[in-house]
Image (tube, grey):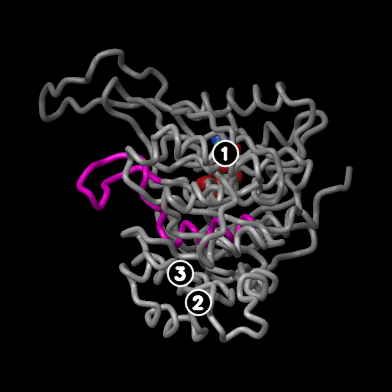
């Protein structure tokens, strides 16, 4: 599990998003963490401490003067045993206090007395978020090594729309997992392709496939969390760019090929290339410059195709090629076909999707095929599989 054995002190401050902190506490626990909740007085107006107590099985602390901890030292004790403090939601008031080192309640005091990292998930009205005072406080917190998670943009409880929504609980769990991820690829440079390609037939029509890009984006994110410098070349995919990843958007296989080659040329050295994109094998030979018109029932257009360059095979053949990972969608004889494809592409590792219809789903099941044979990564979320794959890659790549 992603947060196995971690002790997380979850600070809840007084914003409407406090109700989502209950789901967050559950999510952290499901990921293996032990959760201790501390609430501000204002937070208890939104959610009762009993909710968190029931969910976490731990007493909830709200008060500096709580006598349940020996020596009246709750502010020291609680932060000493934590691996991280996560404040979610973090109000504008809390950010101001933390930025200035105030210590007028238990949570603020804990943040000041801590030795562990502090992560905060701001949640507030968009004007409050954009106010220069809040932005100043956030800049100060960043300078003090506090990790700011979000906020997101969208519909707000007050009816307005804009920046200031707290990240969703699962996103926060994933952010925390990234934060604790071992830096297995520190100092490495990784290039990833993801998503489908789109091959035009005419200005409004084209040929594409059902790849959502989720697996490739998850791999880019996991490589980044493992400390790598990551470039992502993405076909049309409606997904947010993972934090800290340099993304280039393309449409066609030829554009993806060109973007990959320029990324390789621009970097002095790329350690790993992970080809996750579902690249169209063919494109229409002569796409029409005008929209094709219907003429008669027996006059359907006849399309001619030419083959696209094989990006992965081309990269694998380059002089000083990065260590290459290919993906494959095989419907039968997974291992034999996978080995054949691995050899044909000339790559050390091929990852086969097990089963059909993985496109667009949030989970997957993979078979890793290398020169020694195969190894299964059992069904799991794509984020978790991506982390497992990063560990496999890190074990196999040559040291520098
Ligand atoms: N690939 C690529 N460029 C292409 C085609 C594929 O880089 N023009 C990469 C994909 O990103 C993936 C792997 O090669 O890593 C998949 O190879 P491919 O032969 O296309 O596998 P399948 O899609 O499974 O194809 P086939 O129908 O030939 O079995």
The image quarter containing residue 178 is bottom right
- Which residue of the protein is positioned furthest toward the left in this rendering? 296
Q: Nearer the viewer, residue 222 or 155?
A: 155
Rendered location of residue 68, percent (x, y): 57, 86
Give the residue drawn at x 56%, y 59%.
103
Give the residue drawn at x 71%, y 21%.
266
Rendered location of residue 2, percent (x, y): 61, 67
Magenta stretch in the rendered image: 152-179
**Cβ–Cβ below 8 Å for labels 2 and 1?**
no
Determine which residue is flagged by label 3.
39
Answer yes or no: disc 1 within 8 Å of ligand 1: yes
Q: Nearer the viewer, residue 394 or 35?
A: 35
Q: Which element type, helix, strand or loop, lies under badge 1? A: strand
Determine which residue is flagged by label 2.
61
Give the residue drawn at x 38%, y 17%.
286
Rendered location of residue 106, percent (x, y): 53, 67
Q: Which element type, helix, strand or loop, lies under badge 3? A: strand
**Cβ–Cβ below 8 Å for labels 3 and 2?**
yes
**Cβ–Cβ below 8 Å for labels 1 and 3?**
no
The numbered mark at residue 147 is none
Above or below, 151 against 254 in this view is: below
């Amino acid at each position: 599990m992603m947060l196995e054995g971690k002790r997380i002190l979850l600070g809840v401050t007084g914003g409407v998003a406090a109700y989502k902190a209950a789901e967050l506490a559950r999510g952290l626990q499901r990921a293996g963490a032990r959760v201790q909740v501390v609430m501000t007085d204002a937070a208890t107006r939104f959610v009762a401490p009993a909710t968190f107590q029931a969910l976490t099985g731990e007493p909830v602390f709200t008060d500096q003067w709580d006598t349940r901890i020996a020596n009246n030292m709750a502010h020291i004790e609680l932060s000493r045993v934590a691996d991280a403090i996560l404040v979610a939601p973090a109000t504008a008031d809390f950010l101001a206090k933390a930025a200035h080192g105030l210590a007028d309640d238990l949570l603020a005091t804990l943040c000041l007395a801590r030795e562990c990292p502090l992560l905060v998930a701001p949640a507030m009205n968009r004007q409050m978020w954009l106010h220069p005072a809040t932005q100043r406080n956030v800049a100060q917190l960043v300078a003090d090594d506090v990790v700011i998670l979000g906020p997101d943009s969208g519909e707000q409880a007050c009816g307005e729309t804009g920046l200031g929504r707290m990240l969703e609980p699962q996103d926060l769990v994933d952010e925390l997992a990234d934060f604790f991820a071992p830096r297995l690829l520190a100092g490495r440079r990784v290039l990833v392709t993801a998503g489908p390609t789109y091959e035009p037939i005419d200005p409004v029509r084209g040929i594409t496939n059902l790849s959502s890009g989720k697996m490739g984006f998850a791999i880019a994110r996991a490589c980044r969390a493992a400390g790598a410098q990551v470039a992502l070349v993405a076909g049309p995919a409606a997904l947010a760019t993972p934090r800290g990843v340099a993304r280039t958007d393309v449409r066609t296989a030829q554009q993806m090929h060109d973007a990959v080659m320029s990324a390789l040329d621009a970097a002095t050295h790329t350690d790993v290339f992970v080809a996750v994109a579902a690249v169209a094998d063919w494109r229409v030979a002569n796409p029409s410059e005008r929209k094709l018109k219907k003429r008669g029932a027996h006059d359907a257009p006849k399309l001619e195709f030419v083959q696209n360059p094989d990006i992965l095979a081309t990269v694998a053949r380059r002089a000083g090629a990065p260590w290459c990972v290919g993906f494959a969608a095989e419907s039968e004889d997974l291992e034999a076909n996978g080995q054949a494809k691995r050899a044909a592409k000339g790559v050390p590792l091929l990852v086969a999707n097990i089963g059909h219809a993985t496109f667009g789903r949030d989970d997957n099941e993979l078979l890793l095929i290398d020169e020694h044979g195969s190894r299964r990564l059992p069904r799991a979320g794509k984020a978790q599989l991506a982390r497992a794959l990063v560990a496999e890659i890190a074990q196999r790549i040559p040291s520098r």
